[in-house]
Image (cartoon, rainbow, N blue to C red):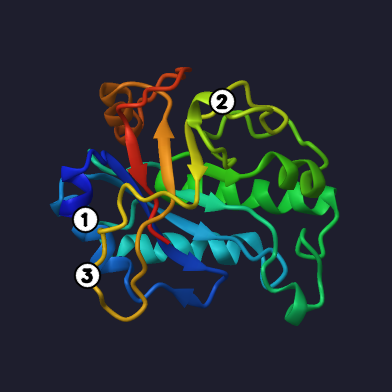
């Protein structure tokens, strides 16, 4: 983590939970380590909409955060809770599809309930990580979540190309993961079992002051791309 800071990283999202039964064995270490290294950090939940209710998964996610400070995912250096919504990687074993076996209407209802539960438990409006294609396929292009900060995944050879078309409802991205094959933070690893070199690289749409404001929960919408604010998203 400290190496990443020396290389220019300013923030990190750390995987906390998946579904309603899995918590990353490295979560506490990575989450607290990011703060010690001087990174503004947040935690994310990998949603599995086919295995349990959104309320169950939201409560499980928030419980993992509560163990690290007072039952609320808040604080002066804590980014909003993040829900990771993407293609089902388990389709060969769970018998569903890229949208976890849900119709667009069902998916929108699932996301809404998850967002509402996390908001009620933490006082923070969760950010949403997704791709434009997944959002179109699996929510039918729902415009209902523009109040949630967008963490967009779209990989390009050069970030100067821009992020392209956004999912329906959003006018701009807040964080953009522009590559999964980055080398800037390749050395951010301690060699432990399950540790992998950091290859996801992200940009925040704003200044360092805006980033700190987002962590305080007083973020005002901003647009633009600041190349001085790269970051890593440990997975």
Q: Position of residue 221 (x, y in %)?
A: 46, 19
Identity of the residue drawn at 77% across and 58% down: 99
174 shown above or below 30: above
Q: Position of residue 169 (x, y in %)?
A: 69, 27
- Residue at disc 2, secondary structure: loop
Q: What residue sits right under mark 1 in the picture? A: 1
Identity of the residue drawn at 30% across and 27% down: 228
Identity of the residue drawn at 57% across and 38% down: 156
CA gap, disc 1 and disc 2: 28 Å
Which of the pair 194/26 is nearer the observer? 194
Marks 1 and 2 in Cβ contact (< 8 Å) = no
User: Which of pointers 3 and 2 lies earlier in the amino acid sequence?
Assistant: 2
Which of the pair 223/52 is nearer the observer? 223
Q: Is residue 199 left or right of residue 97?
A: left
Identity of the residue drawn at 19% across and 59% down: 33
The local crowd at label 2, few if under 14, some if 14 to 19, many if 20 or more residues have their Cα within 10 Å, is: some
Q: What residue sits right under mark 2 in the picture? A: 162
Count of numbered labels shown in the rendering: 3
Quarter of the picture holding the N terminus: bottom left
Q: What residue sits right under mark 3 in the picture? A: 190
200 shown above or below 63: above
């Amino acid at each position: 983590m400290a190496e990443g800071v020396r290389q220019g990283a300013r923030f990190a999202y750390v995987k906390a939970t998946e579904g309603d039964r899995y918590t990353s064995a490295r979560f506490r270490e990575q989450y607290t380590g990011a703060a010690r290294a001087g990174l503004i950090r947040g935690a994310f939940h990998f949603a599995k909409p086919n295995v349990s209710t959104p309320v169950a998964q939201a409560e499980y996610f928030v419980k993992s955060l509560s163990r690290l400070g007072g039952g609320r995912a808040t604080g002066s250096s804590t980014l909003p809770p993040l829900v990771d919504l993407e293609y089902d990687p388990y389709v060969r074993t769970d018998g569903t599809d890229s949208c976890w076996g849900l119709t667009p209407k069902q998916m929108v209802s699932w996301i809404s309930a998850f967002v509402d539960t996390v908001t009620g438990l933490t006082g923070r409006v969760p950010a949403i990580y997704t791709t434009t294609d997944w959002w179109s396929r699996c929510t039918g292009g729902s415009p209902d979540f523009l109040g949630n900060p967008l963490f967009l995944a779209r990989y390009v050879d050069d970030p100067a190309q821009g992020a392209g078309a956004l999912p329906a409802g959003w006018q701009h991205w807040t964080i953009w993961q522009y590559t999964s094959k980055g080398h800037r933070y390749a050395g951010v690893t301690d060699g432990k079992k399950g540790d992998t070199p950091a290859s996801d690289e992200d940009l925040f749409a704003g200044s360092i002051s805006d980033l700190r404001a987002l962590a305080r929960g007083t973020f005002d919408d901003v647009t633009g791309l600041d190349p001085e604010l790269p970051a890593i998203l440990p997975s």
